[in-house]
Amino acid sequence: MGKLWFGGPIYTMDNEREAVEAVYTEDGKIKAVGTYERLYHDFYDKIESEMNLKGKTMLPGLVDSHMHLIGHGEKLLRLDLSQMKSPEEVKEALKNRTANLSTDEWLIGEGWNENQWVNPKIIPRAELDEVSPDNPMILTRVCRHAVLANSRAMEMAGIDNQTPDPQGGVIVRDDKGKATGFFLDTAQELIKQAMPDVSQNYLEQVIKIAVDDLLRKGLVGGHTEDLNYYGGFLKTYQAFINAINGENQKFKAHLLVHHEVMDDMINEGLSYRDGTNYVELGAVKIFSDGALGGRTAWLTEEYRDDPGNYGFAIHTFEDLEKLIRDARRNDLPVAVHAIGDRAVYEVGKLLKKYPLKNGARDRIIHGQILNQEALQLLSDLPVVVDIQPTFVSSDFPWAIERLGEDRINFAYAWKTMLDSNVLCAGSSDAPIEDADPLAGIQAAVLRKSSYDEKVYTEKERLSLFEAVKLYTTGSASAIARESERGLIMDGYDADFTILEEDLFQTGPEKIHEIGVAMTVIDGEIVYDASSEM
């Protein structure tokens, strides 16, 4: 028995503005699309319920192609510093949180961003010690490529002024060689390894909290990278399986597998796309460079606001090549974090040297800064670039300070990539940015900074149709499921995002204000806004 959906605009996303009158779903699949009259006639003896949209708009289910789902859940639970406008405001929030902690309990904050402060300084360790001398403190920067730690946390981690920088990371020191409490990229792990382990029950609860929030935002799925940070592969993988069990929780989670736990996955007899209907394993995740905000993204030219600094590679070229070869020996695609143009180019060369032969797709995560050579490589490869449209909203105008005006034309160059036949998928990188896909769609169309309301590199604006495709067919293409997800078409998964208004008839400035009416997975309503009223 199935459902007949009708009564509002139903956009297939196969062609621009292509809409159908009705959709019939059964057993989690779309069985037919067409007119209400024809579908009712063809399936009248099987229709269990008629779902009248009452003017609401149906899209293929929106999917975030790159996020950190557990991190998103933890941000909802932890001290959120992302909206604070000064170091004083941050320190006051820390002081208030410390008052409720027991001795040696960790104070964990998420999302600080000095670029949105009037005084954009990095808070020194001495000031953190004044706030909390007895509680270890770790504060993750919005990019998640840097943390601040106080002296108690450093003491518990066994870090002093003589501790050497790890490969691919920096312990920032002052002019006297004293560690400031600021840790970049892989150096973060020196602090994190001292934190207490979390339980599997905690992970399951955080996953459920995150999924509930994502469903409210209209997301039917997300591609996430979490498997190397919470006590090992099997513990975290099992937490996903238990939390998203398809019975009391549905969500289509695609789990990237950090290279450090690839062997753990293989030793469990698992590989790409293994799992359940709702939790499946994905590509091998590799970091090739850092982030633009912390000036650790790997560039071909030096940072304009930090002469002599080109960023750095997380791995030596030889080690990066070995990681990709190791993945290929197991017939696995890779998903490589690459923000700077040098990183994108070097990764692209390796993907060309070691092509996939099994129909899966490699991914470049971010691809924020390109040059002509890197773009040409991407256009020649069967690779998908996971882009984050809201980065333009939050990174400009300070990105110009990092890169200079001459390089901005190849930064966040989404339209250029699409016109060069580079497949792109839409994502938030939550908890770094808001996971709301409508905010991402709006940002892709407007390219307007949230700081000064100016439009940056207008030529890279996407049409609304192109922007929505990032989160539908784009995300499906990233995992080579474009023949079964991302469109409203016969045989596709019955995953829908139903909006209160028609976003194709709404002005682009108002897209983020459109409410999510329902989220539907496998033909089942998993979120209904009317039930929350």
Image: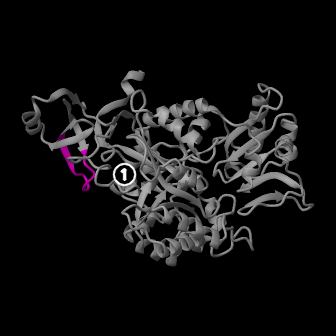
**439 or 252: nearer the eye?**
252
Q: Which residue is drawn at 63% across and 75% down?
A: 300
Classify residue 530 by image quadrant. top left
> Where residue 195 sits: x, y (%)?
74, 40
Left-right relation of 34 to 484: left
Read off the residue under disc 1: 468
Tell me: residue 231, above or below residue 474.
Answer: above
Say whether residue 394 is left or right of residue 473.
right
What residue span does the magenta drawing correspond to?
11-22
Task: Determine if the magenta segment contains residue 17.
Answer: yes
Hey, which residue is sitting farthest right in the picture?
Answer: 176
Left or right of 515? Residue 450 is: right
Q: What colour scheme does the image use?
A: one colour
Residue at (67%, 49%) from the top-left corner?
116
Task: Where is residue 149? Give x, y as percent.
Answer: 79, 45
Q: Quadrant of the N terminus?
A: top left
In the image, residue 316 above or below residue 512: below
Residue 102 on image: x %, y %: 80, 26
Observer-nearest of 117 and 212: 212
User: Disc 1 marks which amino acid?
Assistant: Val
Q: Is residue 304 magenta?
A: no
Dot 1 alpha-carbon crowd within 10 angstroms: few under 14, some 14 to 19, many 20 or more: many
Q: Where's the C terminus, which quadrant? A: top left
